[in-house]
Amino acid sequence: MYGRPDALPRLVSLDAAGYARFGRGEMDELERLREQVGALQREVVRLRNPSQRLWSRRDVVWNQIEETLGLGTWTWDVAAQAVDWSPGLYRILGFDPEVTPVSEAAKVFDEHIHPEDLEAYLEGQERALGGDTSTPSRFRFRRPDGEVIHCLLLYTAVKDAAGEALSFAGAILDVTERVAAEREMVRKGRLEVIGRLAGSVAHDFNNLLMVVLGNAELLQLEQGESEGLGQIQAAAKAGSSLTRQLLSFSATRQGSAPVTGSLRRLVDDAIPMIKRLLREDISVFVEHESGDDLVRVDPGQLQASVVNLAVNARDAMPRGGKLSFRTRTERLPLPEQGVAECVVLSVIDSGVGMSSETLELIFEPFFTTK
């Protein structure tokens, strides 16, 4: 019989009280049997102890492997409808085995899958039951504490001679960090493309504006001051100011590097561009509290974020409203640093707010609700 040492049958020796029921020859035979059983018991104990230590070490090592790789394993006996989870799976999914045994956790598992991913997950489960375990399933899972993680589910099946699945085993990997890294790569690539496009358009447009300004100045010299020429010059200078901001944004995107500067100044420099993006029924307010406002940031990234927030705020106020930008200093707890003096930028609007779907995308570059 193969199995864990603690599953070995317990052997008991015969005691002298039972001898009275047997004759002398039988008693001698039983005595020899007792000695043999005792010797077998001692051998089992001798073999069991190091074997138990081996299994214990194996469990500890495997638990460490699961924790390091961010995975948990499971098994499912189809006939017995018995499910087993490893400690790593409990850890990933956020269940407490002392509070929620695996039988209960397995019953509510589907309820914790994101509604948008549930249908695809169930389809994958049906394929696995039909024998196709080649395609892993991806889904978002809401842990009991409310945190949402991204999971990758892998299957394998143990089949009988007829090809029927007797049991399933597999693993769930927590790929939340991997998904975040992939999104960050896409975000950086998108910003780089936008930066190059903005730079190209701004450069060509600026050249055209220089032609307009130059000819307006020549006409002014020939014909003197006029209201029409003044309006042409003012419009061309405003356009030139806008292209300089676009060129500045493009330069920071193509040669992105953090610099030390005033947060108040960075916000103030972005306000003119923001006002051009807003309707007349939206009022803009800027409020700066006194104090040290030096920050080390990529100016292009910060201003792009502020512009993005302003565009989203505009769409959230279809009937007009207020948009406020505030800077202040505040002592806040930071990871691995404790409480520190921080510079805070708040962007506040009087709009309708955001749906849960929008909240998941608010940090996407240039995302809008249009």
Image (tube, rainbow, N blue to C red):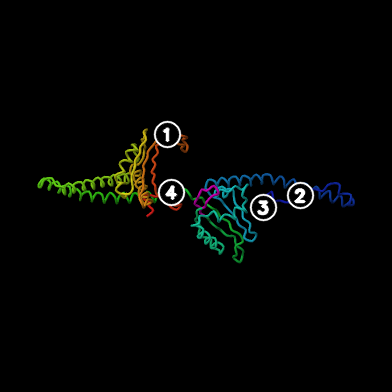
Disc nearer the start of the sequence (1/4): 4
Check if residue 147 falls in the magenta segment: yes
Query: For the residue carrying disc 4, how many other residues have a C-alpha within 10 Å: few (<14), some (14-19), or many (20+)?
Result: few
Q: Earlier in the sequence, mark 3 or mark 1?
A: 3
- The residue that label 2 is drawn on is 11
Q: Is residue 17 left or right of residue 39?
A: right
Quarter of the image with the N terminus in it: bottom right
Of badges 3 and 1, the one in the foreground is 1
State the residue in front, 306 or 154.
306
Of label 4 and label 2, which has the lower sequence position?
A: 2
Instruction: Say the numbered circle drawn on residue 3.
Output: 3
**Secondary structure of residue under mark 4:** helix
Q: Which mark is residue 181?
A: 4
Q: Are marks 4 and 2 in contact (CB under 8 Å)?
A: no
Q: In x, y percent, where is residue 183?
A: 42, 50
Magenta highlight range = 141-152
First in sequence, mark 2 or 1: give its number. Answer: 2
Residue 343 pos. (x, y %)? 39, 37
